[in-house]
Image (tube, rainbow, N blue to C red):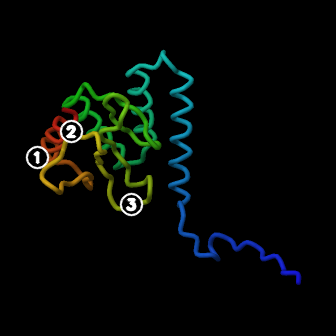
Amino acid sequence: MTTAKKTPKTEAAAGYDGFTADERAAMKDHALELKAAKRRGAKASAADGEADVLAKIEEMAEPDRVLAHQVHTLVRTAAPSLTPKLWYGMPAYAKDGKVVCFFQSAAKFKARYATLGFNDPANLDDGTMWPTAFALTTLTAADEQRIADLVTRAAS
């Protein structure tokens, strides 16, 4: 008995629930970042990462660009030991090669707000539950102080 071959359904018709186009673009950005880092090799410097991050920030539209510049300045001031780098196409700050915190623009994933996020290497543990991401729309002086405190603690 012969069975007819089924034609594959399109992602949309099958209700595909995988990566969005924006997520795939972020992964492509990350692959390019890894290739660039490999090309730079031992010649890589914090200045290279700084230049890459600043260039990425300049590509952002308002108001993300303003927020990203503010966050960049706060991180570089509060934790100068963190190394700027790109991470999935986003400005990020690493310690010993591991991303501690990052800025994600609202436009990156068509979100309502930009995000300041912290990864596992961040020393923010506080009991059994603590926030690891913060929504940003504008920054007040109090917000800037809180970010500086969080980044200082995260980098320690």
Question: Which percent across, then down, holds residue 46?
Answer: 38, 22
The tag earlier along the polypeptide, 3 or 1, is: 3
Dot 2: within a 10 Å radius of its alpha carbon, few (fewer than 14), some, or many (20 or more) residues? many
Q: Nearest the camera: 130 or 150?
A: 130
Q: Which residue, as the protein is rendered here, is positioned at the far top?
A: 43
Q: Nearest the camera: 15 or 142?
A: 15
Residue plotted at (50% across, 48% down): 26
Picture layout, residue 39 above or below residue 68 = above
Q: Which residue, as the protein is rendered here, is positioned at the far bottom?
A: 1
Question: Which percent across, then down, holds residue 152?
Answer: 17, 35
Can you tell which quarter of the image residue 83 is in? top left
Q: Nearest the camera: 136 or 149?
A: 149
Residue plotted at (26% across, 39% down): 70
Quadrant holding the N terminus: bottom right
Residue plotted at (51% across, 41% down): 30
Mark 3 secondary-structure assignment: loop
Which residue type carries mark 2? Ala
Mark 1 secondary-structure assignment: helix
Question: Which percent across, then down, holds residue 77?
Answer: 21, 29
Residue located beneath label 2 in the image? 154
Which residue type carries mark 1? Ala
Q: Is residue 106 left or right of residue 33?
A: left
Mark 3 and mark 2 in contact? Answer it, CB < 8 Å.
no
Residue located beneath label 1 in the image? 142
Residue located beneath label 3 in the image? 111
Mark 2 secondary-structure assignment: helix
Using the numbered discs, state the Cα–Cα distance from disc 2 to disc 1 in whole angstroms: 18 Å
Q: Is residue 120 left or right of residue 97?
A: left
Can you tell which quarter of the image residue 8 is in? bottom right
Which residue type carries mark 3? Ala
Q: Is residue 122 left or right of residue 25?
A: left
Picture layout, residue 105 above or below residue 79 = below
